[in-house]
Amino acid sequence: MNDDSFEEFEDRPSKSEIKREMHALQAIAQRLVDLTPSQLAQISMPEQLEIGVKDAKRFNREARRRQMQYLGKLMRKIDPEPIQAALAKFDQTSAEYTARQHLLEKWRDRLISENDALTQFLNEYPGADVQHLRQLIRTAKAERAGAARALFRYIRDHLGD
């Protein structure tokens, strides 16, 4: 083997490196498949990849495994960085998501336990449906099943993203 061909051989990635990269791309594709339809619509991607992701949602077991390999192959042809950046905002382990959840839970708990919390909430977030919010709070205070969750959803939807 001459020196030129040896240097060329050293520059190529090993089979293990290629395999690790392929698995990483399949993991990104899996995260895309796990998104809700509204989250998926917010991510810019090639049409063929979007169709493949939507198809993978319908498949199960072996068909899904093959589809994930196909999606990994499609991902090799594009730059995955923009998709990873878009996925980061949906990552439920992110500090921003956690802080937002804590804020929502804090408002829910305050609205249920403190009498003046409704006034403070309306001052900070004007435009809320006061009657509906009062009804949700009354129901949650009565500890009816799902009432606290309904109040949480209302606060989450009202505060927006």
Image (cartoon, rainbow, N blue to C red):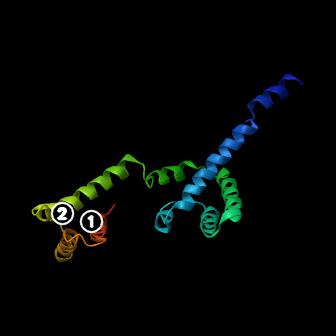
Which residue type carries mark 2? Leu
Instruction: Determine the residue positioned at 72% across, 38% down.
Output: 16
- Above or below: residue 48 compared with residue 138: above
Left or right placement of residue 54 versus residue 137 in this view: right
Percent across and percent down for residue 42 are 47, 63
> Residue at the spot x=19%, y=75% of the render?
135
Q: Quadrant of residue 110?
A: bottom left
- Number of on-image labels: 2
What's the residue at 30%, 70% (across, down)?
A: 150
Q: Which residue is mark 2?
A: 111
* Amino acid at pointer 1: Ile
Label whose residue precedes the other's in the sequence (1 or 2): 2
Residue bearing the label numbered 1:
155
Categorize mark 2 by other alpha carbons within 10 Å: few (<14), some (14-19), many (20+).
many
Between label 1 and label 2, give the one nearer the viewer. 2
* Quadrant, the N terminus: top right
Towards the viewer: 100 or 45: 100
Label 2 SS = helix
The CA span between labels 1 and 2 is: 10 Å
Residue 140 percent location from the top left of the image: 22, 69
x and y percentages locating residue 9 in the rendered image: 80, 31
Task: Place residue 34 in its image quadrant.
Answer: bottom right
Q: Is residue 70 above or below residue 1?
A: below
Sort mark 1 into few (<14), some (14-19) or many (20+) by Cα contacts within 10 Å: many
Q: Which residue is rendered at x = 63% and y = 65% of the image?
A: 56
Residue 52 is left or right of residue 160, and the answer is right
Q: Is disc 1 in contact with disc 2, using a CB cutoff of under 8 Å?
A: yes
Q: Position of residue 151 (x, y in %)?
A: 26, 68
Residue 20's tag is none
Q: Secondary structure at mark 1?
A: helix
